[in-house]
Image (cartoon, rainbow, N blue to C red):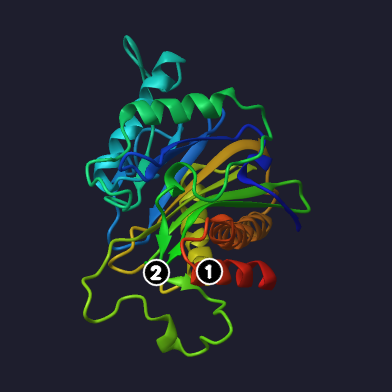
Amino acid sequence: MVAMGAITDVPGIRVGHQQKSDDGWLSGVTVVLPPPGTVGSVDVGGGGPATHETDALDPTTLVSAVDAVVLTGGSAYGLASAHGAQRWCEEHGRGFAVPGGVVPIVPAAAIFDLGRGGDFAARPTADMGYAATAAAAALPEGHDVGRGNVGAGTGALIARTFKGGVGTASATLENGVVVGALAVVNALGLPFEVPPGNPEPSARSVVPPHEPPNLNTTLVVVATNAVLDVAECKRTASAAQAGIARALDPSHTLADGDVVFCLSTGAVALDRSTATARQVSLITLQSAAADVVRSAILDGVDRAEAVSTPAAEYGAYRRAVR
């Protein structure tokens, strides 16, 4: 397995960001725009999710294609940004065909960053979702991805102390399958590797007993060029949740809205010559998905801007141990 750089190493995948960080704002939108016909599903692992159109991605439902995935700040209010992405897709003829036009399938998930820029009412809008989608579409195939405090990661924090943000990673398997991940890290927990001087689990306490619980989330999009059906995408998304658990402690708590989407562009066939070959192919892909999710999360922490001297020291430590 050869490590590469970003979710856009999967041919046809594009990523656009839109954000604001002044006049009371500290929030934004990230859109993953796949090629037409991409199949997708989702797994919701956290206890406090803020999502839109995820039920449509269940393997037992009518549609299989996903036209865009929106990751946004603003908690449930920010889900309005998906309407802008949907509008862009409709204007470009992308969506589920119905009499008279198309209905774009645009699932979305949000992190909690309300008020981090000072204004509780400053949250992503439909226009920001449209702009992020248009930005993704304008980029060339294989483009570099903005990381750190951009898009949905603009106001992200981890453990209330360190800046979180957007990270991405990918890997190429021996059979030519590419697996990539993009993560927005706004987690309650910290990465498992603890900075020197904080070796005890008690030093990693993220919810002091005298403070009310916060709302947190890690959002992930996994993409692959392998041919997967919706059920296989669902299973891959579920397996990729392990990457969150490997990177962050704790994870999938009642205060986290952890969500993993999985997209399949369907360009490379897996070996399905026998039942055993199919099983091995899928397990190998799903194991890689968990690995790149972990790497994408750590990348998001590494690329974030420091908000204090401890955060700067922690960022330097994370870069040293990778």
Residue on which disc 1 sits: 247
* In the depicted structure, whether residue 8 falls above or below residue 87: below
Q: Choose between 150 and 129: the one closer to the eye.
A: 150
- Judge whether residue 96 can be spotted in this image: no
Please tell me the numbered disc located at residue 185.
none
User: Which mark sits nearer the N-terminus, 1 or 2?
Assistant: 2
Please state which amino acid type lies under the numbered disc 1: Ala
Residue 272: image x %, image y %?
A: 67, 49
What mark, if any, has residue 159 been given in the picture?
2
For mark 1, give the secondary structure.
Answer: helix
Does residue 206 appear to the left or right of 122 in the view shown?
right
Q: Residue at x 68, y 71 (%)?
A: 320
144 versus 199 height, above or below: above
Label 1 crowd bin: few (<14), some (14–19), many (20+), radius 10 Å = many
Q: Residue at image x 24%, y 70%?
A: 213
Q: Is residue 254 left or right of residue 202?
A: left
